[in-house]
Image (cartoon, grey):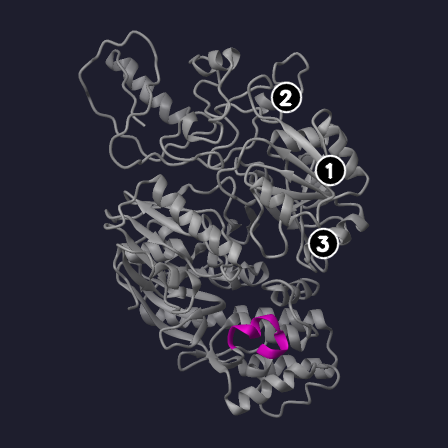
Amino acid sequence: MEIHAEGTEENLEAFVGELRQKAPTAAMIAEMEVRPTEPLKFSEFTIRESQKSDRPTVRVSPDLPVCEACQSELFDPANRRYQYPYINCTDCGPRYTVILGLPYDRPNTTMKAWPLDEYCDREYHDPLNRRFHAQPVACPKCGPQYCLLMDGQKITTGTMERTAELLQDGKIVAVKGLGGYHLACDARNQDAVAAMRERKFRKEKPFAIMVRDLELAKELVELSREAEQLITSMARPIVLAPAKVELPEVAPDNIELGVMLPYTPVHHLLFATGAPEVLVMTSANRSSEPIAYEDDDALESLAGIADAFLIGERPIARRVEDSVARVGAEGPVILRRARGYAPGAVATLPVKRPVLAVGPDLKNTITLVVNGQALVSQHIGDLDHFAAFRAFQETIRDLTAMYEVNWDDLLVVHDAHPQYVSTVHAKTLEGAEVRAVQHHRAHVASVLAERGEWDKKVLGISFDGTGYGDDGAIWGGEFFVGSVRQGFERVAHLRNAALPGGDAAARFPVQAAAGFLAQIESLPDMTAAPFNFPARYRAALDLVHKNLRTFPTSSVGRLFDTAAALLGFTRAVTFEGQAAMWLEQMARKAPPAKAYPFPLSEGELDFRPLLTALIEDRMRGRNIPEIARAFQFGVAEGIAQAARTLCESHSIDTIVLSGGVFQNELLLEDLVRHLSNHFQIWTNHVVPPNDGGISLGQAALAAFAQFND
């Protein structure tokens, strides 16, 4: 944006100071350049139509929650926009989900089909009005509306009241929001939530809930001061927090609830017209598929799930799910970066050419670097689902077109795994240079990119479930030394185990366990009590012994799955990370326990003493939560001891932790206690520590030409 201001030197200095210190609520000034120019003798304040010049550089704003001023008008019977579900102003409302192209002017939004009436046009052009140049502005006379579809009927009057009645009656309603449809039902109605699970094919994964207001949220979950700031922030994410109450079927076997506050006028209207004060509000899709956001697709794909559809006329430009965050041992962390955050710039990289980092296949995001600004997309999902892959392609086209990227100048960066869908697609992009970056190095680089630390020498610890290693093995328990500029050298890792069936073992903890337990001496009969492993364990063990469809792995994620299986989680998981989450929940039920041994020997963290001690305690009949706690504490102590040794030998004072394993808050708490007195501990805060942050790390390493090919 360019501002031309004229006046006395004193007034201009005051103007610049006010701009920096008292920017509008929704504004974020990343940088400001002030330079003198010739006066043009303007006599009034105007905003000129955007002029086409070079490639667009203005950042696209994330979507914003409805502001207090608009909420007040929404419930004021004397106001023109009383109960209007599309009320917004310059301080709030849709941005990313309505923009069709840059510059951000009304003809380039999904509101282009609704010309402003005289009333809205007057507000739009009044510099003293808070709707001055608010591109999605509208009112009931000139803007889009909502309707309710139910039993083949289209209801256009009293739609919010009727929807609220359906929710009170235990029905499931598909509600069109900012970035897609939600499936909503009464969270306190066990039958309604059970029906939601059955229809969505979502067996056990927790549902998010939306509550009427902050006071009610405090009754349901424990909100620290930081967590309260997070849940009420401009991003309005789903915040994970310890539960105070039990909501059957909402979050089975989980001591946390994911809670969010209303953020659109529609949400506020539903609560005001009698909807249950606690609603399950989950992405409208079948399990693991992307959120439905186009009306025709929603009506078709959700026909067997929703009893009714609350549909708004304004089209959604792109699907964007709700963000998920929590406050952990090292402060706020984003677990899924989407609505309210995307596609904001998260870092400034020292690179002039455009860079497209396409991320991994799980929890995919992409990062586009334009003029050095790293723009991270919304969460896209797991690319093994065709609908997610299509969304991945759309997001690439979307961002590169929006910023008019020249493909001949573009550097495309992908994961080193040769068979990832994202890798294969990257190699089909004609005109661009294409290079690979190793998965776990990208995890470490993502933390440093957030901080703009390019030369800092660190010990990077990257623990997750799976990633393609330099040697073709399945990595996931890696220690690196180096910097973003110089690259990262692998200096230690979890001792390799066998992984029968490769990545398929992630779905069956006992299958992963077979590869780890094959190295344990004097192993008891695992199919007998107290372990009671099913037949899949023996079949997997046969693969290990015959070395058929078996791969070496250093995955800490699979080590946690093994421990969960040994403590009773012998069934298949129904969502990613479930067994490890179960193990953490068990451990939280016990007080601190003496750690099991987990030593570093010749550059390898040896899991054998760790698992042997666990098995012996299980055979003795020790309490399962106590065993889980001793295992967790053993892992933390083993990592800490290894980190001290490696930092001392390499003269390092800073430790970087990234990867999905570090979403385990109990593990992170123990590690911080062990290490923070002697070392700086850096973790992800702006992008997720899981694979959702990989694309930023890829882009950062690409900026310094740190490739793996």
Residue highlighted by disc 1: 152
Of residues 491 and 269, the one drawn nearer to the viewer in this rendering: 269
Real-space Cα distance between discs 1 and 3? 20 Å
Q: Secondary structure at mark 3?
A: helix
Mark 3 vs mark 2, CA separation in Å = 34 Å
Place residue 23 in its image quadrant. top left
Tell me the quadrant of the picture where the N terminus can be found: top left
- Decide whether residue 511 is among the magenta residues: yes
* 148 relative to 442 in the view: left or right: right
Q: Position of residue 346 (x, y in %)?
A: 39, 45
Residue occupying the far left of the picture: 38
| Quarter of the picture holding the C terminus | bottom left
Reading the image, the residue beneath label 2 is 74
Q: Residue at x 40, y 65 (%)?
A: 439
Which residue does the image show at 35% across and 72% down from the upper left? 490
**Reading the chain from its start, which is encountered first: label 1 or label 3?**
1
Tell me the magenta residue range.
Answer: 502-512
**Neighbourhood count class around disc 1 (C-alpha, 10 Å): few under 14, some 14–19, many 20 upward:** few
Identify the mark at residue 577; answer none if there is no mark.
none
Occupied quadrant, residue 561: bottom right
- Give yes or no for residue 644 being in the magenta stretch: no
Whether residue 72 is visible to the viewer of this picture, yes or no, is: yes
Q: Amino acid at mark 1?
A: Gly
Q: Would you name the residue on which mark 3 appears?
A: 199
Is residue 224 at least partly visible in the picture? no
Q: Nearer the viewer, mark 3 or mark 2?
A: 3
